[in-house]
Amino acid sequence: MLNIAIKAARAAGAIINRASLDIERLTVTAKSHNDFVTEVDKAAEDVIIATLLEAYPGHGILAEESGREHGAKDSDFVWVIDPLDGTTNFIHGFPVYAVSIALTWRGQVQQAVVYDPSRNDLFYASKGKGAYLNDRRIRVSKRTRMLETLIGTGFPFRKGDNFQRYMKMFEEVMVQCAGMRRPGAASLDLCYVAAGYLDGFFETGLSPWDVAAGSLIITEAGGLVGNFTGEPDFLYQREIVAGTPRIYGQLVKTLAPYTRVITEDPKAVGADEIGADEIDADEGESDPEDDALISQLQAAEDEARAQKAAAPVEPKRTRITAAAKAAEVQEEAASDKRSQGRKRDDAPF
């Protein structure tokens, strides 16, 4: 499965690289304010989906441009695809963008590929088998003090985003670290944490296809990833924080008051620091179509978890080897012999 994902990512990267040679000829469409899509996004997505479904026709697809339109709708396996993360960078010729492909099984990321076509850098990971950049094993940095760290982030950019709320977060983190960077492609930012280039990362307003692959690459590189309260439920929550274990904990402590999932009543948390009006205004992050799709996916995942929790627990089966069975028979025979001896001793004559 990982090899198929790599094949699909490289095919999409070839399309992106060819298009980058003549960016002025691209047709750019605005999905919403400051949220762009080009024919390159669509062509890259098409080749990724075709490659994946040719190998696994029974798998599901969740893609940025086409949603759940392709693939099986009820499969436990779902490929989560961002064909061109960093489209705004791409159409300006700023060489920070990537192809992101992740495979989830029952909501858990199992395989991950992030391909940077401009540098020919391939980040990848399989659950339980470590994270790699090209052919080299990567690990998160060893820094433990916030004052020494370089932190990545992403600015709110869509119409309706609450920039004032973000600036308060930015200010709190900025005064604690050595520097902050905003390259503009979240999937690569997460990989840079995994490789130790950045020590931590946080952003709001992201979709599952932005973070699915990068999140597994970080955890396989020894890092941690979650929402602003430190919980692992981040894929559909529009907020993410990641970092080395020690830095992650310090970022969570700083960002927890700004979470949108910490409580059912957002005004109950951080209202003094953020302001109630600003919390109300923050519900505009991302476009409505994405929000509707992500809400459906979150509801489906919650239902699956509830069904799993309600299902009866099957008794654990123990495999018995021939040697163990023979020993068990011998023990039973010895026990019978002992009991027969006791009966003879107890006899009155």
Image (cartoon, helix red, strand yellow):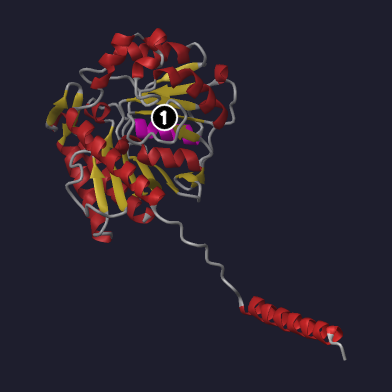
Q: Quadrant of the C terminus?
A: bottom right
Q: Is residue 7 visible?
A: no
Name the spot of residue 292 as percent of width and height, x first: 20, 34
Kind of residue sitting beneath label 1: Asn
Q: Is residue 193 magenta?
A: yes
Q: Is residue 266 left or right of residue 39?
A: right
Q: Secondary structure at mark 1?
A: loop
**Residue extent of the magenta highlight:** 186-195
Q: In this image, 57 relative to 127: left or right? A: left
Q: In the picture shown, does residue 29 fall above or below 274?
A: below
Residue 89 seen: yes
Q: How many residues crowd around disc 1 within 10 Å: few (fewer than 14), some, or many (20 or more)?
A: many
Q: Position of residue 241 (x, y in %)?
A: 43, 28
Nearest the camera: 132 or 207? 207
> Toward the viewer: 217 or 347?
347
**In which quadrant of the rendered view does residue 269 lie?**
top left
> Number of labelled discs?
1
Name which residue lies at 59% across and 73% down.
320
Please identify the quadrant where the N terminus is shown.
Answer: bottom left
The rendered magenta stretch, by its main secondary structure, is classed as: helix
Residue that numbered label 1 is attached to:
227
x then y, percent, for residue 158: 23, 21
Seen from the viewer's position, the closer of residues 181 and 341 is: 341
Q: Is residue 258 above or below residue 78?
A: above
Q: x and y percent of residue 266 in the render? A: 35, 19
Residue 255 lies within the magenta run:
no
